[in-house]
Amino acid sequence: MFNAIEQAVKYQTLIDQPEIHLALKRLDLIHPQISGNKFYKLKYNLQYAKQLGLDTIITFGGAFSNHIAATAYAADYFGFKSIGIIRGEELAQQRLNHTLTTASQFGMQLEFISRQDYRNKNQADFLVELQRRFPKAYIIPEGGTNTLAIQGCTEILTDADRQNYDVICCAVGTGGTLTGLIEASNSHQTVMGFSALKGDFLKQDIANLTEKSNWNIRDDYCFGGYAKTSPLLIEFIHGFEEQYQIPLEPIYTGKMLFGILDLIKHHYFAPNTRILAIHSGGLQGRQNLL
Ligand SMILES: *Cc1c(COP(=O)(O)O)cnc(C)c1O
């Protein structure tokens, strides 16, 4: 199934001028539920969980998490039970939003925990206790980023992508996808991350994950922080969708493309630069927000 699914990926040229070439790699077309980068992040994790003979996938996320929706679907598809530990105990009393409704339709059992408890999600004693309660579960961290996820994300780039482009751009949440792209890139390429979150901490996180230095990450197009938007961003997304007939969403891909096109406008890139932007999917969350 994994190999068949990847055939859906397409390239679409957005700008083709003598001084700049910009193409979009449409990972959003992979699958309506396990779309985009989440497909690559889950791939080896689910294979490994099967090898270990486990029957449940447990993971973490907020109410709008594309990773939660993708994991619910993929776990179900591969015959696992799934449990989503969701940030915010108040949500248990509310009507589920689109993302959580989708997740529960695919059989994910949702556990709502307080923001305070959620902060411990990576701590050893929290994880040991969780594993004790669910001994046959495979635990995937928030956003799905771990070593196997990064390995999966190296497969986003093909040999042709390494040959044909000078700059690779992607949206960044936890940095797993960016790290996979960095690992897969040629040293003459620059990998640029557009952070969906405010702050410098991701730079250090990614530096800890790779020894390469042909990359950078910026947060000046995050529009104030994770899941924050503005009328300007929403207007940009609607305009882009109309012009190119390509759907975006405001948390990741909308911000990245706003940033790339703004940098092009300000002549940030050297003449004749060939840019490949990764459309990392996430469209399931579009209905929550646009
Ligand atoms: C999750 C997600 C990202 C961020 O991926 P990371 O590996 O966590 O950096 C980017 N784009 C979309 C659409 C996503 O759903």
Image (spheres, rainbow, N blue to C red):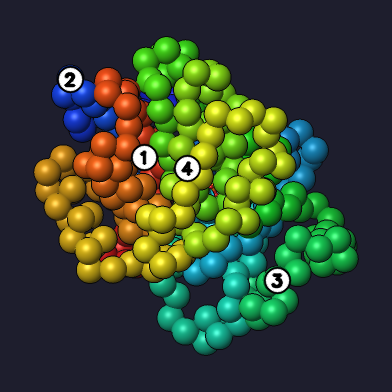
At a point 86% along the width and 61% down the height, the residue shown is 124
Going from N to C along the chain, the mark reached first, 1 or 4, is: 4
| Amino acid residing under circle 4 | Gly
x, y percent for residue 241: 18, 48
* Real-space CA distance between mark 1 and mark 3, rounded to the nearest whole angstrom: 30 Å
Q: Which residue is mark 4?
A: 193
* Real-space CA distance between mark 2 and mark 3, rounded to the nearest whole angstrom: 49 Å
Going from N to C along the chain, the mark reached first, 1 or 3, is: 3
Camera-near label (2 vs 3) is 2
Going from N to C along the chain, the mark reached first, 4 or 3, is: 3
* Real-space CA distance between mark 2 and mark 1, rounded to the nearest whole angstrom: 23 Å
- Along the line of sight, the residue nearer the viewer: 166 or 47: 166
Horizontal side, residue 209 vs residue 29: left or right: right
Q: Which residue is mark 2?
A: 18
Going from N to C along the chain, the mark reached first, 2 or 4, is: 2
Label 1 beta carbon within 8 A of ligand 1: yes
| Amino acid residing under circle 2 | Pro
